[in-house]
Image: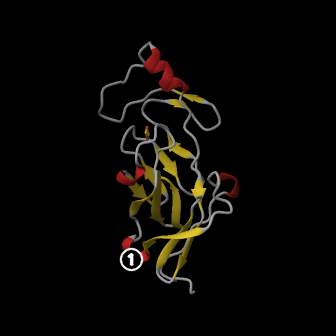
Amino acid sequence: MTDDVRARPAAFPPRLVAAGAADAPFRTVLAVDDLPPGEMRRVSFGDLDVLLAHTTRGIYAVDDRCPHMSAPLSIGALDGCIVACPLHNGRFDLESGDPTQMPTTGGLDPDGVYHPTWSPPGSPEKPDAPGKKAEARRLTRVRRFRYYAVRVVDGQIEVALPD
Ligand code: FES
């Protein structure tokens, strides 16, 4: 077993390990050649969809569900360590796990601080309409990423995944 020098796993905040993943066995998920720098892929195991992202700090594995309303981040965009969600323009830092731009719908950040709705430049203003849908948006908390440990062995990316 040899480490692959072309790609490396990225360190993540230990307190943000995914549930059940701290002592999970490593499983081979993808060849390093299939995840060039700057790219993302979804890999699925049963009903668990995992996002692999080859960032400027290395390879991360998190749930392929936006920490806002669960949209697949694998079809979003990766810029350095920042993932942009395709649904509400939320942006999330894979290094820290934190949002760097709240979704257009606003809501609660990971610490419970409320942020209002907003519109991208050039788009009409988005009113925060009354009613249950708006209330649900206001009460939706954007969470921090939860991580799965990654290692690279013999040209293969391995991820610690719970059974
Ligand atoms: S689902 Fe990703 S920003 Fe809303």
Quarter holding the N terminus is bottom right
Q: Which secondary structure, mark 1?
A: helix
- Tell which residue pokes out farthest to the top in this image: 130
Q: Is residue 95 above or below residue 151?
A: above
Residue 155: percent from left, percent from top: 46, 81
- Mark 1 and ligand 1: say if the CB distance to the nearest ligand atom is below 8 Å: no
- Comparing 124 with 76, the one in front is 76
- Label 1 crowd (10 A; few <14 / some 14-19 / many >=20): few
Residue found 52% across the figure and 62% down from its top: 60
Nearer to us in this view, 14 or 107: 14
**Residue 112 located left or right of residue 79:** right
Indicate the position of residue 146 as horizontal and vertical percent values: 59, 51
Amino acid on which the number 1 mark rests in the picture = Asp
Q: What residue is shown with label 1?
A: 33
Query: Is 111 on the left or on the right of 76, as rendered?
Result: right
> Residue at point 46% right, 57% down?
51
Farthest bottom residue in view = 2
- Quadrant containing the C terminus is bottom right
Question: In percent of the image, x 67 and y 60: which residue is there?
Answer: 22
The answer to which of 24 and 92 lies nearer the viewer is 24
Question: Residue 125 location, x and y as percent?
Answer: 35, 24
- Count of numbered circles on the image: 1
- Residue at x-position 60% and y-position 53%: 96
Relative to 7, say whether 11 is above or below. above
Q: Is residue 82 left or right of residue 76?
A: right
Ligand 1, seen in the image, is in the quarter at top left
